[in-house]
Image: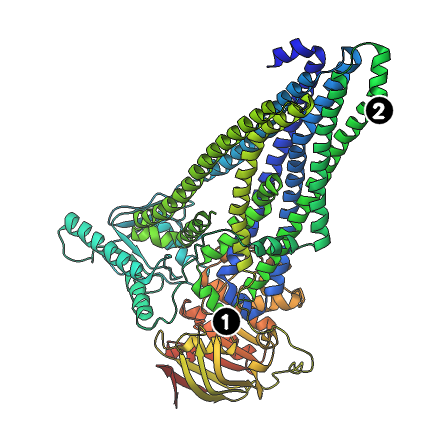
Amino acid sequence: MTVYLYREMGMPAVYGALIVVAAVPFQIYLGTSTAFYRSDTALKSDERVKLMKEIIMGIEVIKMYTWEAPFRNIIDTVRRQEILSIKMSSYIRGVIMSFIMFTARFSIFITVLLYVTYVDRITVENVFFLTCYYNIMRQTMTLFFPQAVGQIAEMHVAIQRIRDFLMSEECHLPTRDQISTDNKFRKKKPKKRVTISSSLTTIIGAVGSGKSTILHMMLSELPTSSGSMKVTGNVSYASQDPWLFVGEILEQELAIIQLMQDKTREVREEESTPNLQSQSMLLPSAVSLTRRHLSIILGISSCADQELEAEAQATGRVRGSVYKEYFLAGTSYIYVFIVCMMFNLAQFFASASDFWISRWSLIEDHLTGDPTIDNLIWSQGGLYRNHYVVIFGILTIATVAVALFRAFLFFSLCMKSSIKLHDQMFDCISQSPMSFFHANPSGRILNRFSKDMGAVDELLPQAMLDCFQDIYIYSSARSPVFGHVNATVLGLATIRSFGAQQLLTQEFDRHQDLHSAAWYLFITCSRAFGYFLDIICLLFIICVTFSCLMKTDIEGSNVGLVITQSISLTGIFQWGMRQSAEMENQMTSVERVLEYTKLPQEPALKIGADKAPPEDWPSEGAIQFDNLSLKYTPDGNYVLHKLNFDVRPQEKIGIVGRTGAGKSSIIQAMFRLAYLDGSLRIDGIDISTIGLHDLREKISIIPQEPVLFSGTLRKNLDPFNEFPDELLLKALNNVELLNIEEGVGALYKQVSECGTNFSVGERQLVCLARAIVRNERILLLDEATANVDAQTDALIQTAIRLHFSGCTVITIAHRLNTVIDSDKVSSHYNSLLFNSP
């Protein structure tokens, strides 16, 4: 086609084609720049999602400590950096997409200008053959080619990230029946060979001395720094942090039974024994894995009041209100109107330039070559050739300028909406009641902040800009994949020790197969849709052509314009319709995000100054339970039934009872983390009449499961920066976590994700240091010493006697020795409280 065009129009056609080709290196550069910013965006997104994972996993602690605002600030900081990278890549993508309108028209303008200036008058046939050629070339060189460059660059980044993950060092698990060690367990000790076989062995030591580390070494979860270790036989492991994989209760029970049957069968086949006594059992909490899981299952099965909510898989079209809420999330009606006008104006200038060259070519077609006659023809139109050149140039430049301005405005609109939606969703999540987190797996919530926000940030603006003109199953099928992977990572040590890798892999395969099936369905439907659209466009072109042949009084320029526009419709119509479907597909992410901006909310965090409690409240710490009942969901069964008891100021109360008796529910009631009936008063003020932060910031707690967040140790002690370093160092010294040689530097020790570089006992001591720093009149201990050794238990009890002697202390425990120093010990059983002498 290029050769034929050269034969018809000579070198001007070549110059026009060179303009399109010359733009390719620039587009390649822009495409690689987009990949760079996309890679940077992926890193920022990973950091944000990691933070969100920690927040979701520790949301109960965040609520009890009233730390919503500090974490909002942390998320905002990371989000701003992420949005900056997204903006840059979006603006570059806008420039690339504006080339679609720029290159073809500018090439036509240069070709026509050179042709009529240096060669001859231009004919209608030449103009519209030229237009068809450049339209085809435009689609290839300015749409598909740069898109391919960008996608290849992004694919390269993705493959590198996958490669780095796959090249990570793998864990080599023990397989036989004896544990033999030849290691340095502690520094400054001589190397010693230890063999453990067919015996009950107990490892004791202070907090942080490496007891759990030894078990992880036996499980090959940690490498040895020197010496060697040999573990033979089947190993069972009960983690200090209880773990269950995502699924229904029945699935948990059947999975455990199946695993136990498989293990029993293996032992009988290998050793011909009918029991499991030869298996090595690693028990950091003195409870076997199966027993703990089964006790939890039996407890939940017997009295469960709530179930995990199944994620909705809606069908049909996205409602118009979703589009409205999206566009108005970060802007106003006026801004949206201006953006719409820019789209109309860009199309107006583009159509005007096509019409203008059609009219120009019609005038040129009537020229005879006789200057006298030609001047008469030009004068009849009122414009001369130079006028047509100038106006056509102005229209071309205006088309390009408005297209660029339109792209920048539109991406700015999308970014503002995306920022606002993310902020609204985070605020709504952080203020949702705990029942929401009990009913929704963390993977589902993370899916909103990862996949859905990624679609809203990047995929939707691109599809919407192409279109501006109903797949829900795929989006819903992805949530179980996120949830399963997240839960699996949290319980890797338990999974490996219990030999459940195959079970979890099969479960992942089921989730991934459903996800892949939904994606395959979307791809096949999209391709079939495009094929039928091409057929429709072809039939339309045939109809237009025959209509022109049947009409005898139509101008040749108009015929060329109609046919040329019809031919260009073939690719544009299919692309536009595909992007229209893609836009609606991505709008499902907006719909899902919007759902999370309208979740039920907790009562007000703060109330008016006229209703707020006094600044020194509670000054005494007296607590009265008056017919208090508690349930975890609005329509659930009561867990606590009409509790009535008083706690006098500075009294030390111990509450004991079996697991599942509802002891920790009293803590939930104190912090208003569940739904209450009746009255609970602190120093005579009903806690239901004040703001949640007014209540929660006045109560200190050492939770049952200590939670640390990534960052510095100082941020974990004082995220508001309210207290001086000296006070924080003193608190750490009081709980024996301070290394004198480190000094202030100890406060800036980095805490890894979920505090995994601290032992459970050390995390519990950090929580105790938090309570010492806050020094509130009421202290609650929720099984605070259940997961620590006797020495740490004694340290905690000593610290409480020393630093909280003038406070009201309520201790929840299941061991009597933990509450032996209490003024009053109560037994909690079947939701009734019985006072004991």
Q: Could you say where residue 306 lies in the image, as x and y percent from the top left? A: 39, 69
| Residue at image mark 2 | 383
**Amino acid at pointer 2:** Leu
User: How would you rate the neighbour count of disc 2 (Cα within 10 Å): few for under 14, some for 14-19, many for 20 or more?
Assistant: few
Quarter occupied by residue 285:
bottom left
Relative side of 630 to 347, left or right: left
Residue 702: image tag: 1
Residue drawn 44% across the image and 35% down it: 528
Relative side of 97 to 401, left or right: left
Relative side of 460 to 299, left or right: right
How has the structure been colored for display?
A: rainbow
Q: Measure the alpha-carbon separation of dots 1 and 2.
A: 87 Å
Labels 1 and 2: the sequence-earlier one: 2
Q: Could you say where residue 729 lies in the image, as x and y percent from the top left? A: 61, 65
Q: Please count the marks in the image.
A: 2
**Amino acid at pointer 1:** Ile
Give the camera-side residue of 119 and 655. Answer: 119
Residue drawn 55% across the image and 39% down it: 579
Relative side of 119 to 262, left or right: right
Q: Quadrant of the N terminus?
A: top right
Q: Residue furthest bottom?
A: 837
